[in-house]
């Protein structure tokens, strides 16, 4: 660790003013303070406020701030729509995450060796990941449209007969629709991370394995996967947390419908808070969500520790 | 497939890889192409059955309508909110990161607390924030959104910049201090130029995060300061020709990001992975 006295070594001719000295001595704390202040104000304060609200009885029609004990939290267990929304979230995450990882990995394998024009391909493939999720959702709603969307047309071409699917309305197809959109937007994210990870794999090991005539699958299992495991873990953590709070894409594609079939936990929380105005209850749901996410993060991080 | 580089097959493998690359790129860019094309189509062409792969002629009336109706204000609002909040987050965050990286202020605990702030799902805080904002009259104004996006981006900036600053050789700073520069001058004249590429990349991503936010903007805007993603959802279920507006608005709203990310291409990987992979 550096000491501040360093700054005064050999500087007798330019001694800073008293204010300057105070500013410099306290500098480590001085420059941390504004950021921490903003985080406390916008991050922590609402959480504490929300915690208090979750123990009260506030609704749209009734600003009843009396202490409700664990009433709101007990209500969570009886709320079937809440558990259904958690189920929907789990389904989407459980299918989309491995798919994104797999497709991202295959894409990375395709582009791992240098070839002319590779940079251009990579630049183009990044596009889905950086556009707004709401634009992604809107775009796929447009593509899936049963009458003038191109997907029906393309499927009909390959099937040789007219195929007309009500993607966002038909219960059988609404999850595939969401997952296709989700996978389209985020596989490139996995691709970028895995491409970087794969190019850091020890070349001499790969060459040695090649000379030994090892099969690709064996090399994958023995060399490549262990080498990129930490990156896979981080990528899954980042994407996993994002998927658990999925909101935008579903809002644009299905708005939670048909019925509440694709209502995820974020959508349900939104409905409770901003359509039903169940203020205190929404606060309780928020803490359930935070608890779940903390649990997932801790578990994943634990596993990563073990892997290391 | 790195391992199949046998000389006799080399050329054939390369051809196959280009075909694969082409197919993959086509698949992933087709939705963008479609959106782009819709934005140039007339209503008749948009609602044509079967769908038309190309507009008859490139016409800009869908864009013109957005300008005429003042809908582009949403883009302007997004630019203001995302731009200002990114600038503030970058300044506050980089200073904070310097302190964490060089003085270890607050130790690992503070660093972990900061990054854990990023893990909190927006949906969990948006409701209490909404209540607080209503109380202070901050709903539907620039200030409220800017504060929120600044806070939202700070953990990211701090975490990224800490990584970049740690990579700056300590000796450079020490010799500058010996030469009589004070700490502020060291930060400005020695550290800043060294981390500038990282700073640029981080700025781009803070901008993109703020730009893409939908949930906060949906809850905290009404009529005055609607941002571009919220504007898009206002078209859904609208009267007649809403796809034309959605497409044109989407293209306008994606343009700034496209430009920023293309310029920052080299730093993409580290930017999106919270510094997990040094790309």
Image (spheres, coloured by chain):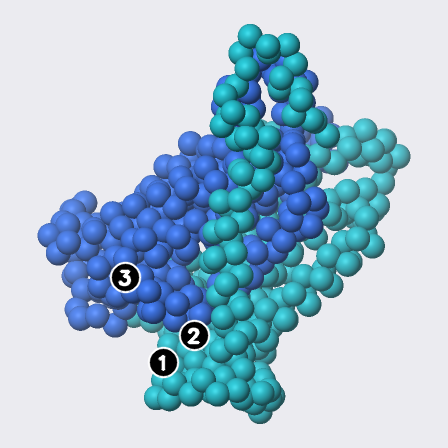
Chain A colour is cyan
Q: Secondary structure at mark 3?
A: loop
Q: Chain of mark 3?
A: B
Q: Could one spot residue B149 in this view of the protein? A: yes
Q: Residue at x 63, y 71 (%)?
A: A291
Find the residue positioned furthest to the left: B68
Q: Can you name the residue that lies furthest to the right here?
A: A212
- Residue indicated by mark 3: B140
Whether labels 2 and 1 share one chain: yes
**Which chain is home to disc 2?**
A
Residue in the picture at 64% in, 60% down: A98
Q: Chain of mark 1?
A: A
Vertical order, A302 against A25 (above or below): below
Locate residue A168, reporting x and y percent: 40, 74
Label drawn at residue A270? 2
Q: Is residue A132 left or right of residue B14?
A: left
Q: Do the residues indicated by labels 1 and 3 lie within the same chain of the protein?
A: no
Given contact means CB atoms under 8 Å apart, are the residues at marks 2 and 3 in contact?
Answer: no
Rendering coords of residue B4 (x, y %): 73, 35
User: Which chain is displayed in blue in the rendered image?
Assistant: B
Residue annotated with mark 1: A275
Q: Residue furthest front?
A: A18
Q: Measuring 78% from the left and 33% from the top, which residue is drawn there?
A: A202
Query: Which of the 4 image quarters holds residue B98?
Result: top right
Q: Where is residue A155 drawn, in percent x and y?
A: 43, 65
């Amino acid at each position: 660790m550096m000491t501040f006295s360093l700054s005064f070594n050999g500087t007798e001719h330019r001694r800073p003013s008293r204010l300057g000295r105070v500013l410099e001595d306290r500098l480590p704390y001085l420059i941390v303070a504004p950021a921490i202040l903003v985080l406390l104000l916008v991050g922590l304060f609402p959480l504490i406020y929300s915690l208090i609200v979750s123990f009260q009885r506030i609704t749209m029609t009734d600003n009843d701030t009396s202490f409700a004990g664990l009433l709101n939290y007990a209500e969570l267990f009886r709320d079937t729509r809440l558990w259904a929304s958690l189920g929907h979230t789990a389904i989407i995450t459980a299918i989309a995450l491995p798919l994104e990882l797999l497709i991202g990995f295959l894409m990375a394998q395709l582009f791992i060796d240098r070839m002319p024009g590779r940079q251009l391909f990579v630049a183009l493939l990044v596009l889905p990941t950086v556009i707004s999720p709401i634009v992604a959702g809107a775009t796929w709603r447009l593509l899936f449209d049963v009458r003038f969307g191109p997907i029906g047309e393309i499927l009909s071409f390959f099937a040789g007969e007219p195929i007309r699917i009500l993607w966002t309305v038909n219960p059988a197809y609404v999850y595939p629709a969401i997952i296709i959109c989700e996978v389209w937007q985020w596989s490139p994210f996995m691709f970028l991370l895995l491409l970087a990870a794969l190019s850091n794999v020890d070349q001499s090991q790969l060459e040695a394995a090649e000379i030994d005539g090892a099969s690709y699958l064996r090399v994958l299992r023995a060399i490549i996967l262990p080498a990129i495991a930490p990156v896979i873990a981080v990528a899954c953590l980042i994407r996993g947390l994002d998927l658990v709070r999925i909101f935008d894409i579903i809002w644009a594609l299905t708005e939670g419908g048909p019925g509440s079939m694709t209502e995820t936990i974020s959508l349900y929380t939104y409905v409770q808070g901003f359509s039903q105005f169940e203020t205190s209850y929404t606060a309780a749901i928020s803490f359930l969500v935070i608890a779940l996410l903390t649990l997932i993060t801790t578990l994943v991080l634990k596993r990563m520790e073990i892997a290391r | 497939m790195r391992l199949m580089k046998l000389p006799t097959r080399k050329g054939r493998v390369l051809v196959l890889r280009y075909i694969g690359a082409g197919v993959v790129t086509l698949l992933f860019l087709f939705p963008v192409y479609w959106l782009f094309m819709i934005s140039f189509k007339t209503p008749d062409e948009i609602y044509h059955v079967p769908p038309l792969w190309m507009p008859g002629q490139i016409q800009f009336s869908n864009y013109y309508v957005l300008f005429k109706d003042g809908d582009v204000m949403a883009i302007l609002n997004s630019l203001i909110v995302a731009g200002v909040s990114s600038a503030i987050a970058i300044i506050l965050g980089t200073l904070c990161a310097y302190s964490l990286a060089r003085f270890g202020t607050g130790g690992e605990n503070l660093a972990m607390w900061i990054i854990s702030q990023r893990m909190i799902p927006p949906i969990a805080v948006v409701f209490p924030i909404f209540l607080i904002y209503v109380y202070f009259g901050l709903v539907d104004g620039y200030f409220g959104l800017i504060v929120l996006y600044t806070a939202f981006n700070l953990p990211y900036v701090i975490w990224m910049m800490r990584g970049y600053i740690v990579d700056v050789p300590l000796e450079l700073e020490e010799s500058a201090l010996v030469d009589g520069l004070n700490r502020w001058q060291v930060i400005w004249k020695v550290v800043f130029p060294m981390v500038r590429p990282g700073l640029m990349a981080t700025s781009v991503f803070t901008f993109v995060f703020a730009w893409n936010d939908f949930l906060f903007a949906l809850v905290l805007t009404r009529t005055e300061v609607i941002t571009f993603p919220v504007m898009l959802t206002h078209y859904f279920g609208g009267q007649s020709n809403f796809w034309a507006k959605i497409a044109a608005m989407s293209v306008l709203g994606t343009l700034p990001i496209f430009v920023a990310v293309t310029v920052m291409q080299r730093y993409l990987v580290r930017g999106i992975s919270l510094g997990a992979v040094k790309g």
